Image: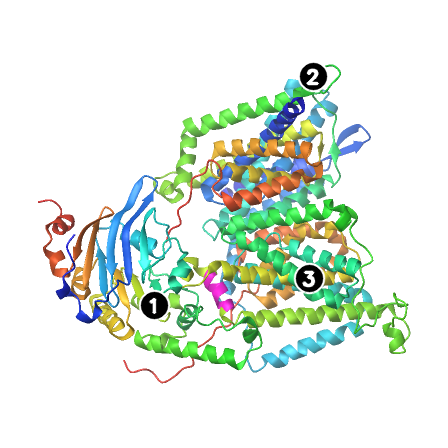
Amino acid sequence: MSEPSPLALPTTAVADRPLLQVRDLSMRFGGLLAVDNIHFDVHGNQIFAVIGPNGAGKTTVFNCIGGFYRPTSGTVLLDGHSIHGLPSHRIARLGLVRTFQNVRLFKNMTVVENLLISQHAQLETGLLHGLFKTPKYRRAEAEALERAAFWLEKVNLLPVANREAGNLAYGQQRRLEIARCMITQPKLLMLDEPAAGLNPQETRDLDRLINELRAENDVAVLLIEHDMSLVMGISDEILVMEYGRPIANGAPEQIRNDPQVIKAYLGEE
Amino acid sequence: MLEFSQQVINGLTLGSIYALIAIGYTMVYGIIGMINFAHGEIYMISAYIGLITITALTVQFGVENVPLILLFTLVVSILATGAYGWTIERVAYRPLRGSPRLIPLISAIGMSIFLQNYVQIGQGARDLSMQPLISGGWRFGPEAGFQIYLSYMQVLIAVVTVIFMTALTLFIARSRLGRACRACSQDLTMTNLLGIDTNRVISLTFVLGAALAAVAGVLISLYIGKINPFIGFDAGIKAFTAAVLGGIGSIPGAMLGGVILGLSESFASAYLLTEYKDVVAFSLLVLVLLFRPTGLLGKPEIEKV
Amino acid sequence: MPRHFSEAVLVALLAGLLTVPILGIQIQVEGIHVSLEGNPAPVLLAMAVVFLLRLLQVPLKAASGLMHITRRFPLPTHLPTAYRPFLLALVIVAAAIWPFTASRGSVDIATLALIYVMLGLGLNVVVGFAGLLDLGYVAFYAVGAYGYALLSMHFGLSFWECLPLCVIMAATTGCLLGFPVLRLRGDYLAIVTLGFGEIIRLLLNNLDHLTGGPDGIGNIPKPTLFGLEFARRPSIEGGTTFHEFFGLDYNGADTVVFLYLVALVMTLLILYMINRLIRMPVGRAWEALREDEIACRSLGLNPTVIKLSAFGFGASTAGFAGAFFAARQGFINPESFTFIESAIVLAIVVLGGMGSQIGVILAAIALTALPEIARQFAEYRMLIFGLVLVLMMIWRPQGLLPATRPRLELPVRPEAPQ
């Protein structure tokens, strides 16, 4: 395991303590060791990619970090505090949110309602305020709509705000899913194959969007991706997995030249 | 100790009945993942068919050979009840294949209410009782003190249950259709893609479940000697409890669950209060679902994220 | 056509096989003498009906194709918004004036219908909005009814004092039960709630010293109007009755009308609450959770709390209705709280359209008033309920008047520059 090269990181991004620390993480399903001793750090404002062949256990790592699976062993620290074993909704409220490999929008609800749902935690004004439609409640609702409008503009979905989410084009659905995460003001955004199914133009837009998010919102991004040009261009650090095990960890140029990675991707000579 | 043994005998008898019904729940759940709420009514209908057949043979035709009556009643009841199982699946469940889980469940509840009232209209709501076909038994223990009583009927229930359970196990394990059943319970879509007519397999499952419920229905009407249109509801929930207890989807689990439930009910009515034996069964259902929804022999389900 | 014909014959034979043992042969018991009696008419009727249905399957299919079109374009449930408050007010005023013009019997039936409207609306939140199938709903109804009966019997509390207490008791019961069970998958949840409902009924039956066992509790006082009783004579020394206070002649129908109006006010209160709730974040969360629980969790929504809010609200509505039921009947026993009662309320929700309030109200009125009007078919009431559940699931699982949840729209603003 090589030390992450300081050259690869924007100097401003290096914090004293990593935002997310994953230590000796393992996940076993019956006889299958899907994740075997994974170990990595994500620093604040960093873009960190996990790559590897299909079935390498990348999504399982996400599910373990996000609290959707209970890891068999290992620890996960967010801001130095253990989030191991917490239910997923608690972890989300601590500032760690995610998108899904096969987009999970509320398809029968409108675009703007999707963004209101994710503000649920911030919108709790109390039952009585809502029942009697007090000014406080109206204000909270107006602010929520305002925030939704801001993010819709950001991801270029304002014109379709009142459409049903299920009727959007695929690329729009992916952007909505990201906006839905960002509106919760997360510390760490986990994107599971955000470029899957996008055309080259949309992928370039995604690249720009992720960089913007990082620059403007002080968010770290942890992503799983197969599109190598996107990953190599955008990431500060990359972890390569194969059969549940880490095989390399480092800056993009190190990964590009790592013989083990080349072997994993291209097979034996 | 003697009283304890007596409760074991009673519990095993009851447990055999529950196990026979529970298999119908577990097989259907294992293959199409639905709770066939109307299965208890199938059992109730079979008890009526059994009673009618026995009455026809003994009163109408004057047959006196008990084994012949028994055999004939079982055959008639299995055939007629199997037809009910097949029809119900065809009419109320097949059109709903692929809908969200709650849709067929609601349909099944409707079917259950329908059947209960259908029998009530046809045969009346009152209790029907019959003369015991097989009476007598063995007594063990001291002449003066507590004696264990093992009736011939109880032995018959155990023997018939074992025969049918063995036949079912062999069928599932050895036959071509049994193999198709096992394949369907692992992956219905894949089995269909491999060219097996899954609709036929599902129909077969309902018929098999109904047939075993028919055996239970005939045995219970001979054992208790009293039936009414409402016996299906309680028996259905209890058999479902047995299926869940053993691990729903698992056939040996249903057998095990039936026996455990029968024993606990029998002990509850002996050592607690008779009125609370149903509370014990329902509480067991709630507790198992809460703390071990996969049951004793079931496999855990992994939630797909 | 010959193929259709032979199939129809086969199906008719099957119908015969099925109906012969249940409808065709009846067991007659006289003393110890058991005999069988043939009754071929219903069997032949069933065979003929099935035969014809099968033979006419093709034209019928075409007709059900038309139903598909109505499904595609649901009935307009949204009136133009400007007319809505006006229309609503009109309906409420009409409902309030009607009992003074109607017969005592029909007002009484309407009161019963209103109880089912309340129950239907409450269960609709649980099943229709939150997607949680609760088969033990009647347990909370029982908590409300027995709660009022016992509180008034032992502590002498009035109906109006008991009403909030019953709501709280039912909500507490709902939360205590809901907390552990709501993490279960849908169908398991249904069965656990069913088991729970049965346990409550068995306890009511067996805790004789508390609940009166199968005999139940009688002499439950009726609600009063600001302390004025609706009775010929005051039940307590020095009390005043309604007719004395207003100097009227005693009229038994006053009580019936008053009970109806109380039920109407209670129903309107529930309607208001639900209509606020579904426009609030919690209402949106119910729908979101029904659509995708995992996505909800990933966004920080606590599924247990959200489900519990729906479950608890449904339970408290049932408790509310239960207290009124006890007061109206004046007498309760466990027979009123069987699984069948839960199934009737479920049938109301399913028939009306899960999530649709107008639908539920109409279905509740139809399913309670029709059997009262067509008494000769009373025997077939539950048979038809069962059939309704099955047929609705096959043809229109979304109900006769499918729900449209009010949406919060983003006001249209000038197009953002691309």
Where does residue C73 sit, x and y in percent of width and height?
49, 67
Q: Tell me the magenta residue range.
A: C282-289
Mark yes or no: residue A117 visible.
Answer: yes
The one of C383 and B166 positioned closer to us in this rendering:
B166
Secondary-structure class at tag 2: strand
The one of B41 and C373 positioned closer to us in this rendering:
B41
Q: Relative to residue C256, is residue C52 depicted above or below?
A: above
Q: Residues within 10 Å of mark 1 (few under 14, many from 20)?
A: many
Q: Which residue is mark 2?
A: B139
Secondary-structure class at tag 3: helix
Where does residue C236 sit, x and y in percent of width and height?
88, 66
Quadrant housing residue B159: top right
Cα separation, mark 2 vs mark 1, equals: 75 Å
Say whether residue C123 is left or right of residue A97: right
Q: Which residue is mark 3?
A: C166
Same-chain status of marks 2 and 1: no
Q: Amino acid at mark 1?
A: Pro
Q: Which residue is mark 1?
A: A186
Residue lying at the far front of the rendered structure:
A16
Q: Residues within 10 Å of mark 2 (few under 14, many from 20)?
A: few
Q: Amino acid at mark 2?
A: Arg
Give the label, 2 or 3, closer to the camera.
3
